[in-house]
Every structure is written in structure tokens, then in C-alpha cells.
Image (spheres, rainbow, N blue to C red):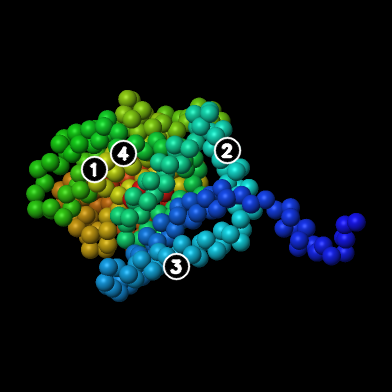
Amino acid sequence: MLNFKNISFTQIKQSLQVKKPWDDVIIFVLNVLIAIPLFIIAHENLIELNWVFNLDRILIFIGIILLIQLLLRLLRTIIIICIFLYVMVLFYGTTLGNYGFNSVFEDYNSMIYTMSDNPYPQDIIVSKLLPFPNKTKILNAIEYQNPRVRNFAVMATTKHFKNVRGYADYRTIIQCFAVFKEINERWNYVSDPKDEDYIASASESLNYFSGDCDDHSILMAACVRAIGGTPRLIHTKGHIYPEILIGKMNDLETVNFLIKNILFTKESYRKQLHYHIDERNQIWLNLDYTAKYPGGPFLSEEILGALTLN
């Protein structure tokens, strides 16, 4: 007869467990995907020791890999279940033509590319985690690599402020102001369908230069980004508007002079610039559709969320 007294609970548990080598593969792939952005953050924020063959950075990467591997193994069952559910959601989204596998791949590639070219890569992840209405749809709609968007932005730079001389360090900002002038002079506010948020892509808005505040913000951000500027979208109560990165306070002084004395003299006469200062003391200038000049009055100033395109 089988002696049940000599069989421990641990032995029973081990006998029920089936080795699944594919679990290790999934855990390892997930480890690498997490480790790459974390390494970029560590690389930018930790002092370089200048060891031969960059051994300090190699050791940091190995340390991150080992630490994540340990954490993932401790949570193996929960993680495998979550990944399975996530894959099902992506499969469903891919089938319906919504957010699916290809979208995830493009978003991850875009995030890594942006982080590698940013002195504060952690801000990229934070901005993606912060709440923002229709964030995914808006990001997809900001088609700054679309040839139509790029060509329109280039056209605006040849139409406005082309002959401004002596401000080579602010050429990109001046050209972005040309884009602002062209869009805001032509923009026609049209509401969304009743009880529905309609998100128009940047290329779609170029057809009639019409739409609501989020459509304007998407087009402005896409065009500014297409010619080298750094835009962000600000979410307030019932409103979204674009801003452009100016730099530090000394940059603001120069930009203030340009706007009031060269670029928008009539529109900004005896008026002040409206801007925000972020946690890194960087200055962002208002580009809302209600503004007649860059830095015009805010329609709604309280910030509930920010979406930066680096």
C-alpha cells in the first residue's frame, strides 16, 4: 500500500508542477525589454567613471538584468497570467484594426529612440504614465513624420520671418513661430460631434484648417516637431492647448524681444508673454489657437496633465 504519511506537502506541490521552459523565455524577453530603458536612465543620471571598455556601464547593465530577473521570477505566476491577458487584448485590438501588436512595437521603439536622445530619459516614461485624455489617439494623430505635415511646416517658414537675421541660435524657434502664425491665421474652430470626442490627425486637419482645441493642438505640435521644435500639449478642465519649449530665462528675454520688436509687433503691443515654468526650470510658451502671438493669454491656465513630444 502507498504510505501517505511519508509524503510531505512540498513533495505533492512539486509533483504537480510541470516544467515550462517557455516561461523562462518569456521572463528573459520581458527582462530585456524592461532593462533597456532602465539602463538608459541609469546611464544618463549616474556619473561616468571612464573605466576601460566602459566596464562601469557594462556592470550596471548586468546588475539591472540580474535584479529584474530576480523580481520577475518571484512574481512569475502573476506576470505570466498578466502577459497572457495582455496578448489577448492586443490580439483583439489587432483584429479590429485598433491598438495592437504593431502599435506596441512602434510605441516602444519610439520611446527608446526618444530616451536615448534626451538628457532626462526618465521624464519620457513619467509622461507616458501620467493621465491625459485620449493619449494614445492623440500621439498617433501627431504625424510629424508625415510628408504633408513636414512640407506644410517648411512652407510656413518660407512664407513668414524668412529674412530675420542675427539670431542663428533661435532659428528653430523663429521658424516654429512662422508655423504658429500660418496655422492660427487660418484656423476655424468647429466643435466635435455631439457627445463624442473626434480626434483628427494632423494631415487631416491640413485639408480645411478646422476643428476643436485638440485638433488644433495636434496639428501645431506635429508641425513644430516636424521642423525641430519641442512641443507639448497641456490638458486643463475642458481644454487642450499646445506650448513650445523656449529654454531658460535668458532665452525668454531674447524671445520676448523678438516677438515684441520684430515678429509680432502689432499683435503683442503693450502685452505680456504667458508661459509656464516646469520642474526643471524650463520655459514653455503658449501657442493656443486663441492667441494672436506666441505667448498670448491663456484660455485656461490650470494644468491637469502635460504630454511632451521630445
CB atoms at circles 4 and 1 under 8 Å apart? no
Q: Residue at x 48, y 51 (%)?
A: 29
Extreme-right residue of the structure: 1
Disc sitting over residue 125 in the figure: none
Residue 105 locus on image (x, y percent)? 43, 42
Q: Nearer the viewer, residue 307 or 8?
A: 8
Q: Is residue 305 visible?
A: no
Give the mark nearer the N terminus: 2 vs 3.
Answer: 3
Residue 236 locus on image (x, y percent)? 47, 48
Q: Does residue 7 appear to the left or right of 265 in the view shown?
A: right
Give the mark nearer the N terminus: 3 vs 4.
Answer: 3
Q: CA distance from mark 4 to mark 1?
A: 9 Å
For residue 115, what is the image quadrant? bottom left
Residue flagged by tag 4: what amino acid is it? Tyr
Q: CA distance from mark 1 to mark 3?
A: 39 Å
Disc sitting over residue 144 in the figure: 4
Q: Which residue is mark 3?
A: 63
Q: Please name which of the two marks, 4 or 2, marks the residue nearer to the observer.
A: 2
Q: Please name which of the two marks, 1 or 2, marks the residue nearer to the observer.
A: 2
Disc 4 secondary structure class: loop
Disc sitting over residue 89 in the figure: 2
Residue flagged by tag 1: what amino acid is it? Ile
CB atoms at circles 2 and 3 under 8 Å apart? no
CB atoms at circles 3 and 4 under 8 Å apart? no
Q: Is residue 167 visible?
A: yes
Q: Which residue is mark 1?
A: 227
Q: Is residue 278 above or below residue 181?
A: below
Q: Quadrant of the N terminus?
A: bottom right
Residue flagged by tag 3: what amino acid is it? Gly
